[in-house]
Amino acid sequence: MAIQHDMFEQFKNKALLRKAHNYAEDYLNKALARNVFPTKEAIANLAQFDEDLPEQPAAAKDVIKQLHQLGSPATVTQIGGRYFGMVNGGIIPTALAAKFLVDVWDQNTPLYVTSPINAKLESICEKWLIDLLDLPQETVAGFVSGSTMAIVCGLAAGRYRLYERMGWDINKKGLRNAPEIRIIMGEEAHSAVKKAVSLLGLGTDNIEYVPVDNQGRMLADQLPELDDKTLLVLQAGNVSSGAFDPFEEICEKAQAANAWVHIDGAFGLWAAASTTHQHLCKGIGKANSWSVDGHKTLNTPYDSGLVLCNDSEALVMALQATAAYLLYGEHRDGMMFTPEMSKRARAIELWATLKYLGRSGVSDLVKGLCDRALQFKEELEDADFEVMNEVVFNQVIVPFETIEIRDKMVQHLQDSGVCWCGGSTWKGRPVIRISVCSWATTKQDVTVSVEAFMTAREELSP
Ligand SMILES: *Cc1c(COP(=O)(O)O)cnc(C)c1O
């Protein structure tokens, strides 16, 4: 078979892999200095992908060449220091190098027997994360695609446990005719939490919302009476303001009522690992489950999310349709802790990141993002922009008079190529949201980005 021969050749002489490697180096050499968002020309060139499905195999080197020539310029330079959109993290070079290597291994990781190395490093990461985030010793970790999936897992574990206590086997009987459970969260809960509620069949109409303060923090004294049929979702890091719920006070109430507490800490939970910001996470150890991303604050490669749960049985039972897999062997089978069976070896990059940074490196990384966010606030205010939020973490909110002005500012900033920020709404006002989320952001990056804000305002003023 000609194509099989061709593929063996590609493995054997490695010219193709070397080519891809050279393209990657070329990308790194240019990307950091380039426009953050692709130029109009780069976007227009994507039309060259519009072709019919080829009838015959192509030359491998042409496939990779096309990808580099058309694809690389059409990427968003998220790995650089001036991308402030969403809450998208940069990439730690050691983790990137680990991913290169692991990509060649192409491991599938549901079971110990499909990848002993991944199983080992899942165990190590689990142990290190408990230590780093100061979580209960019995906590287990599931390695999933991101926080959205991790929230689904945490709430599924809670749902399983609440029903199990009522003598209702949710896996077998489902929600049909089931006794009711309650779901409570702050008015500022992330949309991913609501998605999890609907995916789990709990119904978003059934959510009881707790009022929040002007930073989006749940007001502990407004919390309804909790009971042992309650799922309570708290937040470490509001996606707009970066604010943290008062965990200590709320978790104590929840514990006393035997409610299940999940903390959505997609980017904020890493505050617990920093010497300067860990006060924000005080009390998180009293929750039952947590969700956090590697790919945001920690700057691992995409995609990398974690569900952490202090009730191993509830998590495992919630994620397995049958108990047939529940053979606790001496080795770790990662799929016990995730909805997926087949999945990539994402724990390995997480391990490489933690091993490279160490405890002090993670702490410095978090502090660095927060310092740059404070610098943004100060320089923006010096330039007579308003900053709406208390900058307690890495998020900065800049309001504008009208949606039209905000949209023009956003467009101007994005077109400038200097930096990338997105528009949003906060407390009813049109805003630009700045998220400092990459280790690569320097003081200079912040200064030139604030200058881009000033230029935009000047050129847009009548
Ligand atoms: C990003 C984010 C999510 C969703 O996480 P993904 O990794 O994108 O699935 C959930 N909650 C908060 C607070 C977030 O910032």
Image (tube, helix red, strand yellow):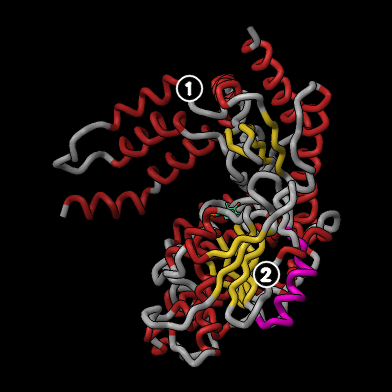
Q: Residue at x 71, y 73 (%)?
A: 130
Task: Tell me the quadrant of ligand 1.
Answer: bottom right
In this picture, is 212 found above or below 45? below
Q: Residue at x 48, y 22 (%)?
A: 39
Residue toward you, 82 or 319: 319
Q: Residue at x 75, y 66 (%)?
A: 247
Residue 58: which numbered mark, if any? Answer: none
The image quarter in which residue 357 lies: bottom right
Which element type, helix, strand or loop, lies under badge 1? loop
In this picture, is 57 found above or below 292? above
The image quarter in which residue 230 lies: bottom right
The type of residue carrying mark 1 is: Thr
Residue toward you, 379 or 52: 379
How far apart are the alpha carbons under marks 2 and 1? Answer: 51 Å
Is the stretch drawn in magenta largely helix, strand or loop? helix
Residue 350 in view in this figure: yes
Q: How many marks?
A: 2
Instruction: Give the side of residue 308 with respect to residue 343, left or right.
Output: right
Horizontal and vertical percent position of residue 159: 52, 77
What residue span does the magenta drawing correspond to? Answer: 245-258
Callout 1 environment at 10 Å: few (<14), some (14 to 19), or many (20+)? Answer: some
In this picture, is 351 found above or below 390? below
- Label 2 or label 1, whichever lies nearer to me, is 2
Horizontal and vertical percent position of residue 445: 72, 29
Quadrant containing the C terminus is: top right
Residue 39: which numbered mark, if any? Answer: 1
Residue toward you, 2 or 215: 215
Instruction: Give the side of residue 215 with respect to residue 67, left or right.
Output: right
